[in-house]
Amino acid sequence: MITRRYFVKGVFAAAGTFVFSGCSEAGAPGVGDSEWVPAYARLEEEGRLQGRVDEAYARLENCTLCPHRCGVNRIAGEEGFCRAPGRAVVHSRSPHFGEELPLVGNNGSGTIFFSNCNLRCVFCQNWPIAHEGRGREVEDEELAEMMLHLQRRGCHNINLVTPTHVMPNILSAVRIGMKKGLHLPLCYNTGGYELVENIELLDGIVDIYLPDLKFMGSEESAEYVLEGRGDYPEKAQEAIIEMNRQVGVLEKDQRGIAKRGVMVRHLVMPNRVAGTREFVDWVAENLPGDTYVNIMSQYRVEHMAFEYDRIARSINSREFVEAIEWAKDAGLTNLDQRSMSQYRLHRRRMS
């Protein structure tokens, strides 16, 4: 039987002219660790990746890719809540340096922004992309070339932003790209509104999960998400528990670059709307204490947020400081480095 190591070598050799733009190993995690390969390469070696692609595409015919369960035939051109067609719509792709430091490294996270969204929060900072769907439809082959382009630029991972509604296209593109030499970790950067059965389909494909847990209260999730039904906290929590089961606590290579694991994001909102104290308590009770958690301070009034009194302002120093202190009190030990720097800054402002 072909070994994992020689299988991956064979994939790269089959690419023929596969090159890396002058930084051949810059983006590869686990350099010096010849046993590390991305999850999807192992699944392909086992002969199971194509089956996952087929199953994902079958779910597009009666779309159940998210909790809305619209049931439309997107392959036939019907549109559901997310308004996405059967093909992926891409707004942009480039190395991104604003993500968490284990994703960014020296060369950036290879970020692909997908248009449309299955949440459409009223305070969305990317509303032209998520709400209006600005972008360009691409075939799976072109999406694969985008991934390979980011790899050639030395990016450390393929960061799939708002992937839920285009998950089948992503899986297809990954398999196409892998046959041409794609070997970077996949980062599934999701708003958190997921169905567990779709996350289960990604088991053995995704290396890094980067979910939001935006709200802990059903009333808030119903009020601040368009057509929100109040089930966001439940669905996001179930999905994150499954993500943790699959990939566990964040693992990094010797350079501090992420290669596998869960990284949970939570945006602090004014007037405690997001339920931050409940969030840190939930993480402490349901995930390992050293789970990577990024408690973020960058809330700003965007899109329709000015129409909602409780979120029509930025957060203040007191609100962010209390959020971090709640996390520390809950016993969370792996808080994002940039967030901790901002915490110290806000504490000085309060003194």
Image: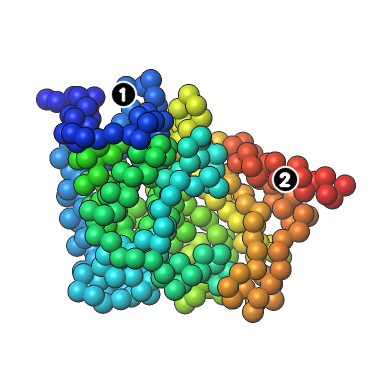
Compared across the picture, whether 123 is left or right of 21 comes to: right
Residue 346 visible in image: yes
Q: Which residue is mark 1?
A: 35
| Dot 2 or dot 1, earlier in sequence | 1
What is the number of callouts on the image?
2
Q: For mark 2, what is the residue?
A: 343
As drawn, is 278 to the left or to the right of 349? left
- Whether residue 6 is situated above or below residue 235 in the rendered picture: above
**Residue type of the residue flagged with mark 2:** Tyr
Q: Position of residue 284 (x, y in %)?
A: 58, 44
Residue 41 percent location from the top left of the image: 25, 37
Q: Residue at x 59, y 76 (%)?
A: 304
Q: Position of residue 230 (x, y in %)?
A: 50, 71
> Picture quarter containing residue 158?
top left
Extreme residue toward the front, this view: 22
Point out which mark residue 139 bears.
none
| Residue kind at label 1, given as amino acid type | Glu
Look at 17% across and 55% down and name the residue there.
Answer: 54
Q: Nearer the viewer, residue 234 or 345?
A: 345
Residue 7 makes an appearance in the image? no
CA gap, disc 2 and disc 1: 38 Å
Q: 10 Å neighbourhood of mark 1: few (<14), some, or many (≥20)?
A: few
The residue located at (17%, 50%) in the rendering is 51
